[in-house]
Image: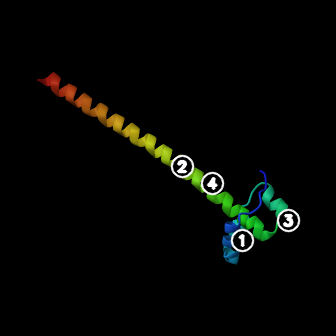
Amino acid sequence: MKIKTPNPEYLEKAKLLTDEEADRLHSRMSGKLPRRRLKDKVSSLEALAIQLELEDEQLNEWREALQKIREKDRAKEEKDKAKEEKDKAKEEKNKA
């Protein structure tokens, strides 16, 4: 994971975090970010800002993936419904 410089927008968000929110965010850090914070290569505030940005990116990726899954499910349901209607019409035709 390449450590990037924090976006100023996320630095502002990080400054507004309560101590409890900051602790929770620190606990979710993974990879090189916590080690760099401990080695003073990145300040705590910068680490929080980077983590906030990473989580936003991951959330957006998850939302896109979920949308694709839902679209597939809708297409499958429509296909199944069309097949069911076709089978029902065929059955009624055979009765007549």
What whole-number distance in Å separates the C-alpha atoms at marks 4 and 1?
Answer: 20 Å
For the residue marked with disc 2, what is the amino acid?
Glu
- Which residue corresponds to mark 3? 38
For the residue marked with disc 3, what is the amino acid?
Leu
Q: Which of marks 2 and 1 is nearer the N terminus?
A: 1
Q: Which of marks 3 and 4 is nearer the N terminus?
A: 3
What whole-number distance in Å separates the C-alpha atoms at marks 4 and 2?
Answer: 10 Å
Q: Earlier in the sequence, mark 2 or mark 3?
A: 3
- Which residue corresponds to mark 1? 23
Q: Which of marks 1 and 3 is nearer the N terminus?
A: 1
Image coordinates of residue 48 in percent, x first then y, are 73, 67
Q: Residue 64 carries which label?
A: 2
Query: Cβ–Cβ below 8 Å for labels 1 and 3?
Result: no
Q: Identify the residue shown where x is 68% and y is 57%.
A: 54
Image position of 88 (left or right of 41): left
Image height of 26 relative to 32, above or below: below
Viewer-nearest residue: 46 or 73: 46
Q: Identify the residue shown where x is 59% and y is 50%.
A: 61
Q: Nearer the viewer, mark 2 or mark 3?
A: 2
Image position of 37 (left or right of 87): right
The kind of secondary structure element at disc 1 is: helix
Image coordinates of residue 16 in percent, x first then y, are 66, 76
What whole-number distance in Å separates the C-alpha atoms at marks 2 and 3?
Answer: 34 Å
The kind of secondary structure element at disc 2 is: helix
- Which residue corresponds to mark 4? 58
What whole-number distance in Å separates the C-alpha atoms at marks 1 and 3?
Answer: 14 Å
Image position of 57 (left or right of 80): right
For the residue marked with disc 1, what is the amino acid?
Asp
For the residue marked with disc 4, what is the amino acid?
Gln
